[in-house]
Amino acid sequence: MGRGHEPLEERDSEPRMCTLIAIYRQVPDRWLVVAANRDEYLDRPAEGPAIRSSASGRVLSPLDVKAGGTWIGMNQSGVFCALTNLSGSQNESDRLSRGEVVTNCLSAPHAVDAAEWLKALPAEQYNSFNCFVCDQDNAFLAVYSDECHVQELGPGVHVVGNSDGLAAPVQKVARLRDRVEGLTESLPDDLLGRLGEVCGEHGVSKVALDETCVHVADTYGTRSSWLLELDDEFGKNHLGGSAESKLFYADGPPCVAPYKNLSPLLKEFEQMPNSQTTEFLTRNAS
């Protein structure tokens, strides 16, 4: 799958997801619409989305097999979280895995609880990251670079890459935000399908990592892609689940890998009894 680009000079020991598009409270009857590409070394083992048990309840997420954490997912209370690594910063091998940041956020009963946990993170505990976390009531973006800064977000199109999410957007982020804002203005019937097309695009930049769908020689690139719609009933633990929530997953670069409909898995997840516990609050109060 090489595209003639040079290989990366240094292997990152952590999983990364390089493009997150989150349309928050901008689409009628859909409080959240997400399109996300995970960029990673092709030989790093991973599992696709599945219902997984944690100390504080069930989550729906993929799994980074090497580090044991995840980069994106949701819990039964309606909290969604995704993380991207910050590029250009030195990684320290003795720091904790960033994959556990998403796991901890998904143990929170509300996004505001996850945001408070992020604000309280000790300095120099993790290598640098952006973390987007939201529920129907609140959305936040945290940027951790030795210490954590958290900003509340309003309704709109939010694009997070591997640059500082609270700084002026780099070209790739600005390009994608403009593109997706155009889609939200026209609101095509198949919004997820159009976002899937955006996730599979390349040829817009001569720099491999500035593409939306990334291919770097035969060692690194976009490994998977995630499309998600959550309607206003998601997370309310209704017996029948939400009627319109959808999940699609491409196991491979979305320029060639088809999106598989995992909406039945999402519905199964919703219909399970909510196993959320007070473990998160107890752990963070100690």
Image (cartoon, rainbow, N blue to C red):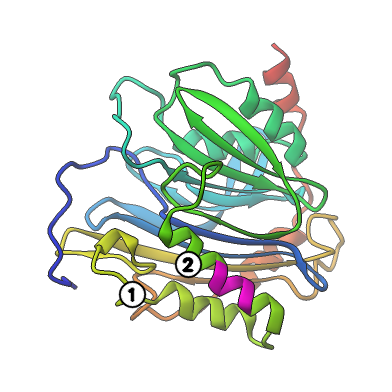
User: At x 70% / y 79%, what residue is drawn?
Assistant: 185
Q: Quick check: 174 above or below 279?
A: below
Mark 1, residue position: 204
Instruction: Name the N-terminal-most of marks 2 and 1.
Output: 2
Q: Taking the image as drawn, is residue 276 in sight? A: no
Whether residue 130 sits left or right of residue 57 in the image: it is left
Q: What is the spatial separation of the Cα atoms under label 2 and label 1, in whole angstroms?
A: 10 Å
The image quadrant that residue 217 belongs to is bottom left
Please say if the residues under marks 2 and 1 sit with CB atoms less than 8 Å apart: yes
Q: Residue at x 17, y 41 (%)?
A: 10
Vertically, is 236 above or below 198?
Answer: above
Left or right: 276 as drawn, with respect to 93: right
The percent position of residue 252, horizontal first and vertical second, equals 35, 70
**Camera sees residue 186:** yes
SS under mark 1: loop
Mark 1 residue type: Val
Q: Quadrant of the N terminus?
A: bottom left
Question: Could you say where residue 254 lies in the image, as x and y percent from the top left?
Answer: 39, 75
Above or below 204: residue 208? above
* Nearer to me, 43 or 162: 162
The amino acid on which the numbered mark 2 sits, given as a three-letter code, is: Arg
How crowded pointer 2 is (Cα within 10 Å; few <14, some 14-19, many 20+) is rated as some
Identify the residue position indicated by label 2 in the image: 175
Using a 10 Å C-alpha cutoff, classify the residue at mark 1 as few (fewer than 14 neighbours), some (14 to 19) or many (20 or more).
few
Q: Quadrant of residue 26?
A: bottom right
Q: Is 225 part of what is drawn in magenta?
A: no
Magenta residues, as a range?
178-182
The secondary structure that most of the magenta stretch takes on is helix
Please tell me the numbered disc located at residue 56: none
Q: Secondary structure at mark 2?
A: helix
